[in-house]
Image (tube, rainbow, N blue to C red):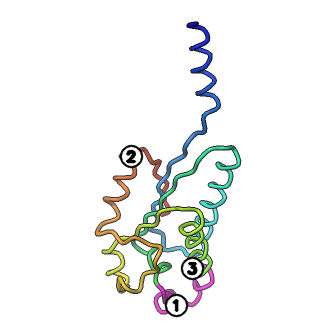
């Protein structure tokens, strides 16, 4: 009986889906880099899910990464970066609305980028300080992935 119990425990452990938890912290000012990272988050989720595992992701935004969450970022972003920021915004929106990724923006960064809270897209949660959220995610077992 003891051997059957051990076998069941081992089999349960082998066939149980893993959960991959990560918080992606974005402060980059490189529009093309931000765009490619948002694409990569989606591809990473897809790869994890194809393996039969679960991806639980969050994205914290601060510094120069917050303009893409403004409803009218074309007034804030340099013309040369508009296409990349638009695509990053589209990826981010899909991640939040279709994939369940939590998106948190720092209120201090919004203020420093002259973005009013009412001008932030609806799928973004505004935090007084996104560093606190990032630390909280880490304390809850999320791996930290940074975009600098």
Query: Residue 63 in magenta?
Result: no
Above or below, comparing residue 39 to residue 54 in the picture: below
Magenta span dominant secondary structure = helix
Q: Position of residue 23 (x, y in %)?
A: 47, 55
* Dot 1 or dot 3, earlier in sequence: 1
Identify the disc placed on residue 74: 1
Residue at the bottom extreme?
A: 75
Residue 55 at what x, y percent from top left?
57, 51
Give the residues in magenta: 71-85
Task: Report x, y in % for residue 128.
Answer: 28, 69
Looking at the image, which residue is at 43% across and 64% down? Answer: 60
Q: Position of residue 144 (x, y in %)?
A: 46, 51
**Residue under the image location 64 percent in, 31 percent down:** 15
Observer-nearest of 123 and 61: 123
Q: Nearer the viewer, residue 45 or 54?
A: 54
32 to 18, vertically: above or below: below
Instruction: Report which residue position mark 3 lands on.
Output: 85
């Amino acid at each position: 009986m003891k051997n059957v119990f051990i076998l069941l425990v081992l089999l349960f452990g082998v066939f149980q889906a893993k959960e991959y938890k990560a918080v992606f912290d974005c402060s980059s000012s490189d529009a093309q880099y931000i765009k490619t990272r948002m694409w990569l988050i989606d591809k990473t989720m897809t790869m994890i899910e194809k393996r039969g595992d679960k991806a639980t992701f969050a994205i914290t935004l601060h510094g120069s990464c917050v303009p893409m969450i403004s409803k009218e970022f074309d007034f804030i972003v340099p013309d040369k970066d508009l296409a990349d920021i638009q695509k990053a915004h589209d990826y981010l929106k899909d991640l939040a609305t279709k994939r369940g990724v939590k998106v948190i923006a720092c209120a201090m960064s919004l203020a420093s980028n002259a973005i009013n809270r009412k001008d932030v897209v609806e799928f973004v949660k505004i935090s007084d300080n996104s560093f606190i959220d990032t630390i909280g995610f880490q304390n809850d077992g999320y791996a930290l992935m940074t975009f600098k």
